[in-house]
Image (cartoon, rainbow, N blue to C red):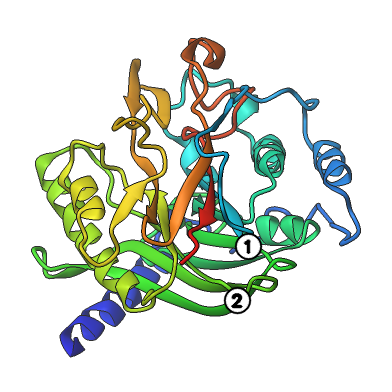
């Protein structure tokens, strides 16, 4: 443990120096939304109208989604709606999104559509990855009774790029009218095979329902990307470390583990997540023993990338899924896929309704 802490702090210091000395990076911190001044008495309609008034195009309908109900005979007074979404770091939109119009990638437009998608579902708890505009999310969502916590990556690739808005990371928002925050815990992954710390992180909060007094543990993460055997092995290591981290805080507590795992259902990390004997997790979107066809659908280097890599895992002992919001139909997405004028990220959001099992 002591060695791990030494490696962590040395790595963090090295990253800071590299970011500071890089001639390609202009790191001014989280500053790109100072043109917006939100009022706490804004309705959701007011908020969206105000945000779109500062964009370059009018509000358009986002890609339609269908709500699917699986268990309407729930026997619980306590329910929770959770949302998972990799919102696509703005700094990373300068990658290969050549099929997406430049105007649709501008932050002044994307931030409005991201809010549009978020507010459409009225979720109780929301988990985001690739957040590099936490100030915007925090101030905007505060008008809708949400509080949030944020954990940036120490190795964020954003800080090495020009005109960045600081590092990206993971964020969790919760409706503070419904929930009280009891605790927040952070994890920076450590790759035992590489004997080094990782830029990837996990964030966990313990919430208490102010009415039912039930506790709920929510963890979110963003695991290693790249499609190779080596990266799949590292993702599985991260999954094991994530489970060890979560179980420290979730004794007898209903738990959801949400995030962009960058691994498909055939990968070891998926099996690791659903095979843990302590948590007994299941994927909310695994209906009839099958995950959705995709959670990300984009064009890269002229070819279509269609993968299922985002999940909402939950403890079956304490929670039951009553419904989800399905992935959209491919014909409604458009031939250029996402992001687009009708969707602001290269990942689709996941939304699940869960109810607490009665003892």
How many residues crowd mark 1 within 10 Å: few (<14), some (14–19), many (20+)? many
Give the left or right position of residue 214, taking residue 11 as reference: right
Residue lying farthest to the bottom in this orientation:
2
Total labels: the figure holds 2
Please say whether residue 17 is visible from this viewpoint: no
Label 1 sits on a secondary structure element that is: strand
Residue 187 image point, x, y percent = 35, 72
Residue 48 image point, x, y percent = 81, 41
Residue at the spot of label 2: 181
Label 2 sits on a secondary structure element that is: strand
Q: Residue at x 41, y 43 (%)?
A: 284
Q: Residue at x 35, y 66 (%)?
A: 18
Q: Residue at x 8, y 63 (%)?
A: 193
Residue 226 image point, x, y percent = 24, 40
How many residues crowd mark 2 within 10 Å: few (<14), some (14–19), many (20+)? some
Name the disc covering residue 174, or none.
1
Q: Are marks 1 and 2 in contact (CB under 8 Å)?
A: yes
Please say whether residue 352 is visible from this viewpoint: yes
């Amino acid at each position: 443990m002591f060695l791990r802490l030494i490696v962590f702090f040395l790595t963090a210091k090295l990253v800071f120096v590299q970011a500071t000395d890089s001639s390609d990076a202009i790191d001014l911190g989280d500053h790109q939304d100072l043109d917006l001044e939100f009022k706490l008495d804004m309705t959701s309609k007011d908020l969206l109208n105000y945000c779109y008034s500062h964009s370059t195009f009018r509000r358009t309908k986002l890609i339609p989604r269908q709500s699917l109900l699986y268990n309407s005979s729930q026997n619980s007074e306590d329910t929770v709606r959770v949302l998972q979404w990799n919102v696509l770091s703005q700094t990373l939109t300068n990658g290969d999104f050549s099929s997406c119009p430049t105007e649709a990638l501008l932050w002044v437009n994307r931030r409005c559509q991201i809010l549009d998608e978020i507010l459409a579902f009225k979720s109780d708890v929301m988990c985001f990855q690739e957040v590099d505009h936490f100030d915007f999310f925090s101030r905007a969502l505060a008008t809708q009774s949400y509080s949030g916590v944020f954990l940036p990556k120490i190795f964020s690739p954003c800080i090495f790029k020009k005109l960045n808005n600081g590092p990206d990371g993971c964020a969790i928002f919760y409706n503070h009218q419904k929930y009280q925050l009891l605790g927040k815990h952070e994890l920076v992954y450590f790759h035992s095979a590489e004997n080094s710390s990782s830029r990837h992180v996990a964030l966990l909060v313990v919430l208490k329902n102010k009415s039912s007094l039930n506790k709920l543990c929510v963890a979110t993460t963003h695991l290693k990307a790249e499609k190779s055997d080596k990266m799949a092995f590292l993702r599985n290591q991260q999954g094991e470390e994530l489970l060890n981290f979560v179980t420290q805080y979730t004794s007898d507590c209903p738990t959801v583990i949400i995030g962009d795992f960058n691994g498909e259902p055939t990968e070891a990390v998926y099996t690791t997540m659903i095979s843990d004997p302590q948590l007994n997790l299941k994927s909310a979107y695994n209906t009839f023993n099958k995950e959705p066809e995709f959670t990300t659908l984009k064009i890269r280097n002229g070819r279509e990338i269609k993968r299922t890599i985002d999940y909402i895992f939950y403890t079956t002992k304490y929670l039951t899924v009553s419904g989800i919001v399905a992935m959209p139909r491919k014909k409604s997405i458009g031939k250029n896929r996402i992001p687009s004028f009708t969707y602001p990220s290269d990942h689709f959001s996941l939304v699940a309704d869960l109810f607490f099992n009665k003892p």
